[in-house]
Image: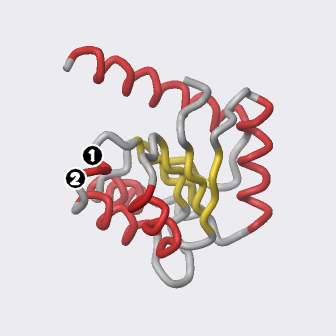
Amino acid sequence: MKDIFILIVDDQVSIRQMITGILRREGYTNLHHAENGKLATQVLQKEKVNLIILDWDMPVMTGVEVLEWIEGNEQNVDMIKLMLTARATKENVLEAMGFGANNYIVKPFSPNTLLNKIEILLKDFSQEIESQ
């Protein structure tokens, strides 16, 4: 599962680089980036993305708008969607989940938090595929 296609979407270069470093150290190799939601949708139209790590507040197109776009596109139905954002209220979490996020991490976060959430999501996802 370490070769899955992961799309990291955040307008802050430092966050994209940090996430990339964390995932590379863990053995993930197929890592791609987008600096805003619009660029993310362009990648999603061309590639089979297995996991998207998505910031909420970005210029051009927000993370929630990307979630809405994903939900309207059948080719992305099997994608795992992880929101990674500074928005920390219960209402924000519920809103993101309502738009299709599978899980939610609040910034700042630890590498272990990110890796644990991804591991749980991938385990659930692989079990779901096996049961189909």
Crowdedness near tag 1: few (<14), some (14–19) or many (≥20) residues, C-alpha within 10 Å: few
Considering depth in this image, is 46 or 91 the residue closer to the camera?
Answer: 46
Q: Residue at x 45, y 46 (%)?
A: 49
- x, y percent for residue 51: 48, 43
Work out which residue is located at the far front of the displayed protein and give it.
46
Give residue 95's mark.
none
Q: Position of residue 43 (x, y in %)?
A: 49, 62
Disc 1 element: loop
Q: Residue at x 29, y 23 (%)?
A: 129
Pointer 1 residue: 77
* x and y, in percent, of residue 66 in the image: 39, 66
Q: On the image, numbered disc 2 is attached to which residue?
A: 74
The spot of residue 123 in percent (x, y) is 44, 21
Residue lying farthest to the bottom in this orientation = 60
Which of the two residues, 36 or 98, is positioned nearer the viewer here? 36
Gap between marks 2 and 1 measured at Cα:
5 Å
As drawn, is 41 to the left or to the right of 106? left
Residue 15 placement: quadrant: bottom right
Query: In the image, what residue occupies the spot 52% across and 58% down?
Result: 54
Could you tell me the amino acid type at mark 2? Glu
Q: Amino acid at mark 1?
A: Val
> Where 26 falls versus 83 (above or below)?
above
Q: Which image quadrant: the N terminus?
A: top right
Front residue of this view, candidates 28 and 64: 28
- Which of the colour schemes (rainbow, by chain, secondary structure, one colour) is used? secondary structure
Image: 49 above or below 68: above
Q: Residue at x 47, y 75 (%)?
A: 38
